[in-house]
């Protein structure tokens, strides 16, 4: 199992997006996923539309998140840019280790 990193808010947004993906998949709605920003801000629900393939590529790494271009956190670096969102990775030195 891949261990999650990031803030509790990011984990919650990631979980929400996973549920959206599962629902879209079960109803064969697979052209575009309408997800939410996975930034560190606890009250951000900015929409992000992404292809299922792009979403799967982000999910392949526990340290990567989909965020709006202007929502990049101080402990993140942009690893991929798209028209309406960026993919960020947690900077290794700042990733919180489990207790």
Image (cartoon, rainbow, N blue to C red):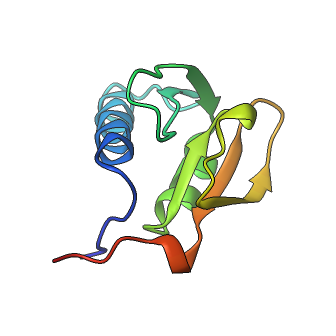
Q: Residue furthest left?
A: 99
Q: Residue at x 42, y 67 (%)?
A: 62
Tell me the residue at 48%/39% (across/down).
38
The correct choice, above or below, for 7 with respect to 42 in the image is below
Side (left or right) of 21 relative to 65:
left
Instruction: Give the position of the C terminus as an image quadrant.
Output: bottom left
Tell me which corner region of the image, top left, top right, bottom left or bottom right, holds residue 90: bottom right
* In the image, residue 97 above or below residue 26: below
Is the N terminus in the top left, top right, bottom left or bottom right quadrant?
A: bottom left
Q: Is residue 56 above or below residue 69?
A: below
Of 51 and 92, nearer the camera is: 92
Which residue occupies 63% across, 35% down? 50
Residue located 63% across and 54% down the image: 74
Q: Position of residue 83 (x, y in %)?
A: 84, 33
Total number of numbered discs in the rendering: 0
Residue 37 placement (x, y as % from top left): 53, 32
Where residue 91 sits in the image (x, y, percent)?
59, 71
16 lies left or right of 44 = left
């Amino acid at each position: 199992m891949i261990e999650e990193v990031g803030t509790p808010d990011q984990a919650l947004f990631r979980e929400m997006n996973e549920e959206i993906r599962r629902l879209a998949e079960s109803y064969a709605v697979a052209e575009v996923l309408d997800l939410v920003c996975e930034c560190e801000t606890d009250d951000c629900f900015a929409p992000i539309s992404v292809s299922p393939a792009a979403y799967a590529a982000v999910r392949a790494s526990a340290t990567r998140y989909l965020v709006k271009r202007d929502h990049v956190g101080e402990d993140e670096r942009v690893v991929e840019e798209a028209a309406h969102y960026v993919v960020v990775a947690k900077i290794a030195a700042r990733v919180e280790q489990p207790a």
